[in-house]
Amino acid sequence: MLTDYIPLIFMVVFGFGIGVVFLLAAEALGARRRTKEKASTYESGMPPVRTARERFSVKFYMVAVLFILFDIEIVFMYPWAVQFKELGSTAFVAMILFIVLLLAGYIYVIRKGALRWD
Amino acid sequence: MMGYEFQFILPIILISFFSTSAIVIDAIFLRNKSIGFYYSLAGLGITVISAIYSLIKANVALIPLHHSDRLITKGMLVFSGYSAFFDIIFCIAGILTILASKQYLIREYREINEYYSLLLLSIAGMMIIAHANNLLVLFIGIELMSISFYILAGFFRNNLRSVEAGLKYFLLGAFATGFLLYGMALIYGATGSIGINKAGFFMSAVGKAPLILSIGVGLLIIGLSFKVAAFPFHQWAPDVYQGAPTVVSGFMSTAGKAAALIAMVIIIRPLVPTDIDHQQLKQIYNGDTIRLIIGLISAATMMIGNITALVQKNVKRMLAYSSVAHAGYLLMGIVANNPKGWDGIAFYAVAYMFMQIGAFVVISIFERDNEFNMEISDYAGLSKTHPVIAAMMAVFMFSLTGIPPFAGFIGKYYLFASVIQSGYIWLAIVAVVASIISIYFYIGLVISMYFKEPEEKIQQADKGLSYITLGIASFALIIFGIFPSFIINLSHRCFNLFLF
Amino acid sequence: MHELIKFVPLFPLIGFLVLGLFGKYLKKEALIGAIGSGTVFGSFVISLLIFFDFAAAHHEKPILVPVYKWIETGVLNINISYQVDQLSILFSLIVTGVGFLIHVYSIGYMHGDRSYYRFFAYLNLFIFMMLNLVLADNLLLTFLGWEGVGLCSYLLIGFWYDRKFEGYKITWTGDAGNKAFIVNRIGDFGFIIAMFLIYNEFNSLQYTQVSNLAAEATMQYFGSGTITAITLLMFLGCTGKSAQIPLAIWLPDAMAGPTPVSALIHAATMVTAGIYLVARNSVLFALSPFSMEIVAIVGIATAFFAATIGLVQNDIKKVLAYSTVSQLGYMFAALGVGAFTAGVFHVMTHAFFKGLLFLGAGSVIHGMHEEQNIKNMGGLKSYMPVTYKTFFVATLAISGIPFFSGFFSKDEILWMAFSNGNVFLWLIGAIAAFFTAFYMFRLLKLTFHGKERFDAHHVHPHESPKVMTIPLIILALLSAIGGFLGIPYALGFWFSHQPNLLETWLHPVFSQAQAILHRTEGHQVHSIEYILMLVSVAIAITAILLAKRFYSDEKWSVPKALAGKFKPVYNLLFNKYSLDEVYYAFIGTPVFKLSQSFLWKIFDVKIIDGFVNGLADVTVSTGERIRRIQTGVAQNYALLMIGGIIIIIAWLVLSY
């Protein structure tokens, strides 16, 4: 039973390991020369003049949240698509319902102007 | 089989359809400010009719759940008399609230259609709770209801109190949900199933239930105690009910509470030995401890709620505290865990819905800016300036106190009788003492309305559909108070079908 | 057909609701009157239909028609359910029939009153409650009706709440209403206790069940203390409602209400509720010989004393009130000797003639512009011919002149008192009958005959409108011929084997009780019955002639001389045996004193209030303290939640 989870554990260890390895490699192999330009926020372009604690327009958040929301949709669809034949018509109807629900939200978002930038 | 199942599942399909399509309708008819009002009323009306139909059907036949793999819902939903019964309660509470909301919203804020779709969504969540036969479905229902409530509580986004209420409710609610979910996980771990009844069968099969099962049940009770606002998880309730839009408070504290209670019944009924069956489980499972804990929670809740309500000067806050106390009364039915207790919960949920929504609607008629005209002193002499409203408010107060012949009395009677029947006499005594304390502030308001001279500033009352809500509520309280047998017989039949 | 019984009480209820809620907006008196009397007429028609149906079907057993489950607690289940049997049909016919006539009469009598709709609303409510009382199949529903009619009585006695009314310690009509209500409470107390005892003994409050259980265990229950206690307490309730000694004092003051109310409630229907209750529970009473004796003695004593008071009263309604008390005494005497049919028979005839007498008195008062003292009347015969003639018929009926209704019923009671009781009961009853005939003819002479003693310049007596006189005529017909329903065997044996139709009709209701009392319906002719009949007729005629002689003389020299000669007796009677004063001195004042000096000032203020206020202070200060936990900071709330969670989980782990 627990053996079923071995690939999962392996994946977690592997993913985590790659991150750690690359970080350590960059630290060990990379050259370090600190200059003023390098420490500034944007190396190229206008130098920052005011406080960094500024309020962003709510539009940024809206777009971000909506992106995540509709992105997740795809995540739900992957397993369904892989198992499409085995799951049969019930799952197909369920998925249609799911997409219709998302569509309802999508219509709402567009009509309320959440995606309008100005 | 499918058509047969369909007639029971229809109320849930309908409410889900109307709650989501309400959003689309709102988006399509952007200019029309009242379409949400009419659409949601119509939707609830249709849903309630289908729920009544399925209630009638459910009294004749019940889907045999042991054939659940042949069902579309695979036994995740239960279609029983009691779920249809509670569907009807939720829909009627929604209708009463919506009727009272229109004028209130226009005056206090502005009427926007999202309000109605959120209300419908929360009702959808409650109905899913009432039909849940599976811990995950239960969780989805609870969250759907709660998230809608978080938003509704903070609906007046320009009003600090309302925003504070919404945020507080959300933070603490999320905190409690964690425990709820953890409890479900533990139950799954112990029994290997998320089906509620499967868990129950598991318990009768094994010799001695594992510890994590009883901790899981304990955590579930903690999470649900938060939803019903029981001590010591009640502290959000006064702040939220006071800050939220008044009609929403009325709705949250009645329908929301009833939904959390039916969730408790659903969980406790198979997991904890009752008086009537599972007798052999008493030896292998510490269900009595769980009942004792709920009993103590119930006793503390009603005492704390009533004693704190005693010193409130603001009527809305007083009702908020008293709603905490009423959660305590309702929990007695869970403690009893016998048919009489369930009848009591069902009847009291109905009566409480009418009296609490009615009382909050009366407040909503007079208040200004979610803050003013809510003191008890503002109600002085109301019987002279607004005799009809004062009379109806008096009916609500008497019923909340539990004075015959109003419905509140009958509900309390059944709850008290149920705990006495199951041997928790001390709890009944505490409840009686708590009720006596509550007389002071409920009747205090009536005295203020009837025996004090009106103040110089004259209260302005709204005109509008709220009066329909008030009329229905006070009429129902009197009728069900004098002829309680209709509801009692109905709920009795419904819960008799509580077979798995 | 009997299913329709539900609608009998429903109609007056609808009438009450419509008039009570919307009466204010109904401007036309005719419309209000039509609704008020129409609903009662509807009930009457349905009662008649049920009566014919029932009579044709020859039902031996009562039919129970459940309407609604009222109280359901597992142990105690009470239905709102009606019992259709011979007794309840008879009573509902009397209530709706006579009630309808009085409603019609009121249309004229109450003309121009500022609370016209309120009056009819109350009357309809009364009919509804009275029907519940007589149709109920269980004691609790009867009690509901019992209290309901008491409430209506109270509301209607004080209907003209701002009018003065004279009486002992009474200044307003409302005080009279209070008196009636309070005196009745004493009786109701008995009723309630009796109900508890019955439930305790039989585990049921349903008449049929209780009667059957009691009748089955005759040996066990006969003369037992329980049954005696139940019946005596129940009879206490009856003495309250039916104004018998010792609770008779409220009825004469109840005359403060409008005259149709006196006719309907305080003569024809409500006051007979006591008779109904005893008749309905005849089995229980039959099982307790002691209670039966008490009922008979109280009844005959009331009949006698009230009749003596009636001899000297001058207020037309007071005379009739005492007459009512006296006649009710006869009925109880009949019940007490086991002659249930005779008692119920007298209820019926009394409803006819006493209703008529009150309505006639109302017509007189109406025509005389609210004058009630008969010493200021006289000679009204020519002004009010219809009223006079109908009043005369009723007077003949109550006096027991042969072949009028009162003759049959009263004679049956007297004969039963003689044959089943003893000669003293008969003797006192006969003397009371003598007084009855005397004071009634005194009333008739003083009111309608002789010289006109009123101030003809200011008072112009006139006949009442048709809407008032037609009910009078109908009631007069009934008073004249109503008695033929109960022809005694001794007079009717030559044409029928069962001449007493009422007895045949009621036989199934009382058969159980009769069996317990070992009564067979004696269908033999006793020569002594004829002698007694002749004696009582002779008594009536003597009294009438005497009254005629006394009061034909315009100076009333004989009565005045008698009053002078027997001054103490006269004063005693005139002051109604000083009963009010005695009650007040021995009960009223001590209770007041005790309440004021001890119960209020010491027990209530010091002990109860001190305790309650102290408790309240403790609670409030606890509340203030608990309120401080409610900081308003969400983190603190979460902290308390964590505390709770830890305790609960720890408990679960430790108790595992």
Image (cartoon, coloured by chain):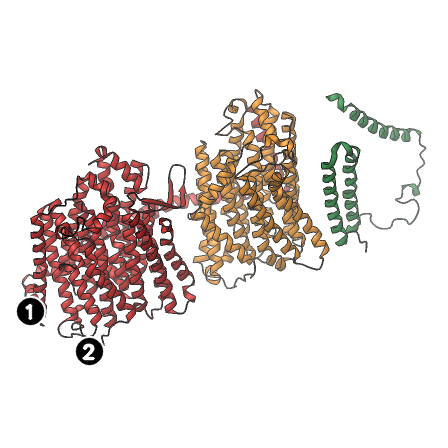
Chain colours: A green, B orange, C red
Q: Tell which subunit mark 2 falls on.
A: C
Residue C517: % across, % down: 18, 40
Question: Is A87 in front, or is C5?
Answer: C5
Q: Which residue is mark 1?
A: C557
Q: Does residue C536 show up? A: yes
How would you rate the neighbour count of disc 1 (Cα within 10 Å): few for under 14, some for 14-19, many for 20 or more? few
Residue extending farthest front: C495
Where residue C285 appears, x then y in whole percent?
Answer: 22, 42
Badge 2 element:
loop
Q: Where residue C596 sits in the image (x, y, percent)?
A: 28, 51
What residue did someone put label 2 on?
C456
Residue C427 appears at what percent x and percent y? 9, 51
Q: Earlier in the sequence, mark 1 or mark 2?
A: 2
Q: Amino acid at mark 1?
A: Ser
Neighbour class for label 2 at 10 Å: few (<14), some, many (≥20)? few
Decide if residue C424 is on the left or right side of residue C92.
left
Residue B398 in view: no
Task: Identify the element where label 1 is drawn.
Answer: helix
Q: From the viewer's perspective, is C571 left or right of C612?
A: left
Q: Chain of mark 1?
A: C
Q: Nearer the viewer, residue C491 or B421?
A: C491
Q: Is residue C310 left or right of residue B489?
A: left
